[in-house]
Image (cartoon, grey):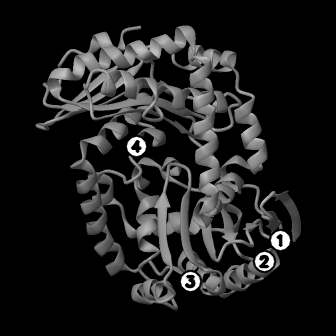
Amino acid sequence: MSTRTLHRGQDGSVVKRTVLPGGLRVVTESVPTMRSVSFGIWVGVGSRDESGKQAGASHYLEHLLFKGTRQRSALDISSAIDRLGGEMNAFTAKEFTCFYARVLDADLPIAVEVVTDMVLSSTVTGPDFESERGVILEEIAMHDDDPADVVHDTFAQTVFGDTPLGRPILGSVNSIETISRDTVRRYYRRWYRPEHLVVAASGNLDHAAVVRLVKKAFTAGGVQLIGEPPASAVARRVQPRPKPGGAAIVIPRTTEQVNLVLGVPGVDRNDPRRFALGVLNSALGGGMSSRLFQEVREKRGLAYSVYSYQAQYSDAGLFGVYAGCLPKKVDDVLDLCRAELQRVCDRGVTAEELERGKGQLRGSLVLGLEDTGSRMNRIGKGELVYGELLSIGEVLSRIEVVSLDDVRDVASEVLDVAPTLAVIGPFDADRDFSGAVAS
């Protein structure tokens, strides 16, 4: 077992990391001024690690692990945290899954015990599996009823094609209807092992005490924390091959509003340009003072919602512009969005926009530190997907050194290509949007 201190904050916070035998990593952030603790177990597997036959398995497991263990029923799990006034939940992403609880600092031992029991000892019974199949199909139906959600999935699928990164996290109706309990159980046994897990906790805690609680809980779950982690500890990712731009996909829906995403492949999460692209994203479409909001909504009243966003993965990324507008305004909205993308490619941003974008990134980062859940997410995700945890000061420094030239360069390198367009609205499937994606 090895332990080291990663960072000490000006607020008295201390981040420590322990690697236990077998490869389990425990990262904590002690924040003495807090009265709560957020505890999470991060699993290094998500929807992009699934084969076609496994599509939706990661999210299916997220549901199933709340259904009961050898020691606790589903009601026992939920009531154990409810009676403390705490909260417990989980989420699945493309490259990881997280189960977490937030409780008063004195109740941390119970949170560790309950969440660890869920993650390690789920029974995945036949009746539970079938009942959750219906629940997930309902969730897919709810998702499919919201075109603002569907258009983002359609955009990703158009860019990445029929690859794991291009598929929805929830899976499809067909994959959920046909996936077997044995398939999900095998997936569970393969991935939910110490070498793929990171335990993260933040709040009023003692690192050594958390490590002891984790070791006790994992031993109770039948996991022997011994030996060296196996060589297969890191998941093998399927390399995505973004399709060439210039595609426009239209999904006909009898909706009152058009939902659209216009975008391009972005940068991966370890790309040094990500900080410059973050500043560009803020200036272009990250707030009410952004170019897109001002030009599309404030000056012309063409849309209620318009923004830009980026998604970053281990080896790929997306950069997109979303808008929702009336069908008769769609061409004007697309013309403006495309014009603003081209303008930042040609000229970058202004000095005022640069400072405003930096300020927005700084503020969102620092304000998030007031919540133990956000802190736990930061250190857990940092350890699991980045393999390093930058201090707040280091992140702020990397934001601060972004220059006008950096933003101009990343804009020309990333955005100056033929974009991809996904549209959902009351149009025929062959509605011509080629002008919006022409190179």
Q: Tell me the residue that label 4 is attached to.
A: 167
Question: How would you rate the neighbour count of disc 3 (Cα within 10 Å): few for under 14, some for 14-19, many for 20 or more?
Answer: many
Q: Amino acid at mark 3?
A: Val
**Which residue is labeled 3 in the image?**
114
Label 3: which secondary element: helix
Q: CA distance from mark 4 to mark 3?
A: 32 Å
Q: Say which residue appears at 59% left-offset and 59% top-offset.
A: 374
Q: Which label sits in the foreground, 3 or 2?
A: 2
**Residue 271 image position (x, y, % from top left):** 68, 32
Residue sitting at x 38%, y 25%: 294
Which element type, helix, strand or loop, lies under badge 4? loop
Image location (x, y in percent) of residue 389: 75, 51
Which secondary structure lies at badge 1?
loop
What amino acid is labelled 2 in the image? Asp
User: Between disc 3 and disc 1, whose residue precedes?
Assistant: 3
CA–CA distance between discs 3 and 2?
19 Å
Name the N-terminal-most of marks 1 and 2.
2
Residue 70: x and y, percent? 51, 89
The earlier-in-sequence mark between 4 and 3 is 3
